[in-house]
Image (spheres, grey):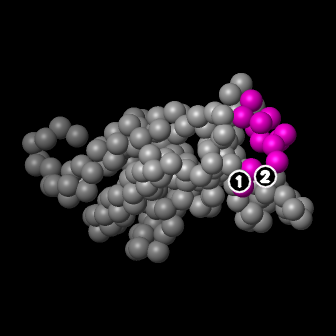
Amino acid sequence: MALPTSSETERTVYLRNIVATAENVIDWPRLTDDDLLLFARIIHMYSSIDFLLRMTVEIMDEAGMLAPEWKGKTPKLNMYKLNRAIQSAEIWNDGQLFAFASIEEHRRVRNLVAHFIARRFPSENAYLFMTKSAADFEQVYGTSAPTGTMLYGVTDADQLAGIVPILKGLLSWLSKLPKDLSTPMSKHEDT
């Protein structure tokens, strides 16, 4: 599972220092209804994005638009490989390729809100995400997790909420692709 890349800011260092000196973070405040709504929104938007990506790749595969190594393999691809298959077509401009890269980058946040336990900081508008997944720990640190440790991440609540408009824009753009790709171009249209 792809996890968010660490972005070192004064704020995240400050938040991590709070966690490092805290006891019983599992007892920190639980998520509010608004927090849960935000998390659900992110997760559901990615369900929609994934559905549209699968529709898009199906159309492209059927039309022979993908690089030969992807032909006929798309129904069984995970989302990372599916995105690569879509990008293998030589029809995308730099802005569209950037949009596909953004989808994959923000998917990491979706994985965080969907698979980690979350708590609110007691005195900050921020979240603490925690997991005991040995596989995730090894992915981040390249070694097995010592007994009694957890993998955790911190994020500012406003920063997390800030990806929703980005996801809405990506979803709006992506929702047009299946129709655009399945509409034949006339011989007289400029390409």
Q: On the image, numbered disc 1 is attached to which residue?
A: 27
- Callout 1: few (<14), some (14-19), or many (20+) C-alpha neighbours within 10 Å? few
Q: On the image, numbered disc 2 is attached to which residue?
A: 24
Q: Residue at x 66, y 34 (%)?
A: 123
Q: Where are the magenta residues, as a range?
A: 14-26
Residue 130, x across and y down, in percent = 69, 54
Compared with 100, 50 (above or below) is: below
Q: Residue at x 62, y 44 (%)?
A: 120
- Callout 2: few (<14), some (14-19), or many (20+) C-alpha neighbours within 10 Å? few
Q: Residue at x 74, y 63 (%)?
A: 132
Q: Is residue 20 magenta?
A: yes
What is the three-letter code of the residue carrying label 1?
Asp
- Quadrant assignment for the N terminus: bottom right
Q: Are marks 2 and 1 in contact (CB under 8 Å)?
A: yes
Q: Nearer the viewer, residue 95 or 23?
A: 23
| Residue furthest top as drawn | 10
| Residue furthest right as drawn | 146
- Quadrant assignment for the C terminus: top left
What is the three-letter code of the residue carrying label 2?
Asn
